[in-house]
Image (cartoon, helix red, strand yellow):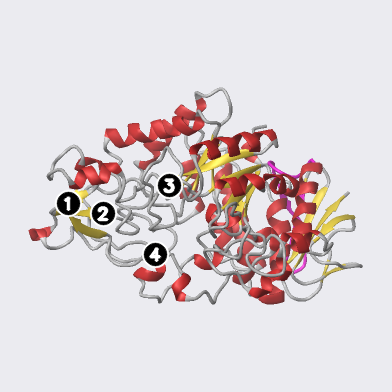
Amino acid sequence: MTWWRDAVIYQVYVWSFADSNGDGIGDLPGVRSRLPYLRSLGVDAVWLNPFYPSPQADNGYDVADHRDVDPRFGTLADAEALIEDAHQLGLRVILDLVPNHTSDRHPWFRAALDTPPGSQERARYLFRDGPGGDQPPNNWISAFGGRAWSRAGGQWYLHLFAPEQPDLDWTNDEVRTEFRDILRFWFDRGADGFRVDVAHGLAKDPQMPDVDSFTTGAAPEGHPHWDLDEVHDVYREWRALADAYPRELIFVGEIWVQNPERLARYLRPDELHTAFNFTFLSAKWTAEALRTAIDESLRSLRAVGAPATWVLSNHDVTRHVTRYGGGEAGVRRARAAALLMLALPGGAYVYQGEELGLPEVLDLPDAARRDPTFFRSGGTDPGRDGCRVPLPWSGESPSYGFGPGEKSWLPQPDEWAGLTVERQSDDAESMLRLYRAALRQRRLLPALGDGDMEWIPAAPGVLAFRREPGFVCVVNVGDSPAPLPVDLQLVLASSPFDGPLLPGATAAWFIG
């Protein structure tokens, strides 16, 4: 069995994981120092958000050099040492790849502005004249708000995100060759794979028609710059490149599309290996919504032989403790959701801090915010900074062991003193101890990981399924106690209980 089909991968947002030098910003030496923590947590691999040289207009997703490390985060030697240390601990390392766009400070884009329209340098990006020259080519809008076109060098250039992130033209052979070389550069340094940013966005309709309506979230069918069929040619090239290496290398796609069937097309045997399951992440906390998301995902992925990759939170969405209602109720539901996710067939991603039960920070001061979504929306959209606040490791006051001093690039709430790794490690009922126990059992129980599942009858509001050999997961999504559909040996529960009734917002694992 291949490792990636059932791996649990921990997402490290480098800015916010661990600061080694006291400047308030996380860095690669900080990550390296905390690798033993990840090993003890029980995950199989780590995914690192971008650490490449960047002006940081979008916290590293505006890459100026794909083959080096931003001085804020360390050096190329630090990256190589981190990969080596991780491998010695039995952890694989997934890097972030940003192929849809570069930084406007990338040498390619600067060269494009220094050459005339029609030049080879401009052909790497999507420059257009626009009607009469003074109007943008169409009505496309940026994912961060505002129009998706900016004027420079006498033409308009497309940026589906911030103006500092000009889109590349993936019909250009130089672009395709460059990214194949980038993959080789990091594979040759030991990287075990890549998470592909905006994997559904590389291809654009060459006619560039206006968009009839604007939506957020998943790409609607027939959209002119999301989920076009031509993107699949790129991933077939990459898969062939990765498969030529003697060790097993993987790609996981960030793919926001309208249904699991469209998602499955990216996971055919000669394309990407896995994709984040945003259908599951987006499901409401109801038994019906969760079961529908699970069923649709497994059915569509089964058709292409790909495993599901479940996820509850990441650096772009509100943390699920808060999404599930916040407070005590949100924590209780998040605990149950963790056991549900880790019992489902396939793999899973854990976003840093979810194992601590961290909530979204909703009251960040405007002066501290960095997310371009906040600024381009005029402050009407709070952006994503609230899920990116640096982790609390130890101590009673900021920076809670995040770094050697008090500084952190986003302020940490006072109440996080009770959520530190240090505090939770000594608390048998903590979220951290639950994750450690669940990941330990996931390794021990042969039924968990890749494979199949079968729903079993249960009371309304209860999800129950069997996995062979001899495992049953029961989740009471409702708020009131419900009868258990099985009488088996309890292995683990998200909340304590005794007797034939499963409390509300509780998940339990059984064997027998």
- Based on the picture, tell me whether residue 265 belongs to the magenta stretch: no
3D distance between C-alphas at marks 3 and 4 = 20 Å
Which residue, given by chain and number where applicable, does mark 3 sit on?
A: 199
Q: Quadrant of the N terminus?
A: top right
Element carrying mark 2: strand
The span shown in magenta is: 446-466
3D distance between C-alphas at marks 2 and 1 = 8 Å
* Among the two numbered marks 2 and 1 on one chain, the one whose residue lies closer to the N terminus: 1
Q: Is residue 354 left or right of residue 227?
A: right
- Principal secondary structure, stretch drawn in magenta: loop
**In the displayed structure, would residue 416 be above or below residue 16?**
below
3D distance between C-alphas at marks 4 and 1 = 24 Å
Q: Is residue 145 left or right of residue 87?
A: left
* Among the two numbered marks 2 and 3 on one chain, the one whose residue lies closer to the N terminus: 2
Contact check, label 4 and label 1, Cβ < 8 Å: no
Q: Is residue 148 left or right of residue 417?
A: left
Q: Amino acid at mark 3?
A: Ala
* Among the two numbered marks 2 and 4 on one chain, the one whose residue lies closer to the N terminus: 2
Mark 2 residue crowding within 10 angstroms, few (<14) / some (14–19) / many (20+)? many
Residue in view at x 42 percent, y 50 percent: 198
